[in-house]
Image (spheres, grey):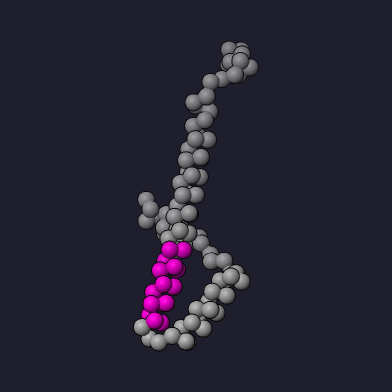
Amino acid sequence: MNNTLKLLYDRLYTALPMSEAEQEIETCHRQLIERLEKPERKLVLRIMDAQGLIAEERSVDSFLCGFKLAWELAYELNHFEMDRHPSPVEEAEMDA
């Protein structure tokens, strides 16, 4: 089921425009890469890639949790009428 929800996420999700903080991070990242030697650059790139992967995984997880919660709420609402006891007014209407 998670694969289906992941496909739904991929289809429906639209990335937000970059915030000022994200633009600042990107600018600082580029400046740092320009100043470092090759081994250090690779390390910084690995860190940035790992951060991006973590952010993507959290976004997908948040979507999945929200979708499952909505699904459970819809199920509860659909079965609410069957599970609840009728009020005295409703019982009188049924007897009439």
Q: Is residue 41 magenta?
A: yes
Residue 91 in view of the camera: yes
Q: Position of residue 56 (x, y in %)?
A: 45, 63
Prevailing SS of the magenta stretch: helix
Towards the viewer: 31 or 65: 31
Q: Is residue 37 depicted above or below 14 in this figure?
A: below
Q: Position of residue 30 (x, y in %)?
A: 50, 82
Q: Is residue 46 depicted above or below 92 in this figure?
A: below
Residue extending farthest to the right is 89
Q: Is residue 24 depicted above or below 60 in this figure?
A: below
Residue 46 falls in which quadrant of the image? bottom left
Residue 50 falls in which quadrant of the image? bottom left
> Which residue is rendered at x = 53% and y = 20% of the image?
85
Which region of the structure is painted magenta? 40-55
Image quarter of the C terminus: top right
Q: Position of residue 48 (x, y in %)?
A: 44, 73
> Which residue is rendered at x = 42% and y = 66% of the image?
53
Residue 90 falls in which quadrant of the image? top right
> Which residue is rendered at x = 41% and y = 72% of the image?
47
Q: Position of residue 68 (x, y in %)?
A: 46, 46
Towards the viewer: 56 or 8: 56
Towards the viewer: 41 or 67: 41
Q: Is residue 45 depicted above or below 75 in this figure?
A: below
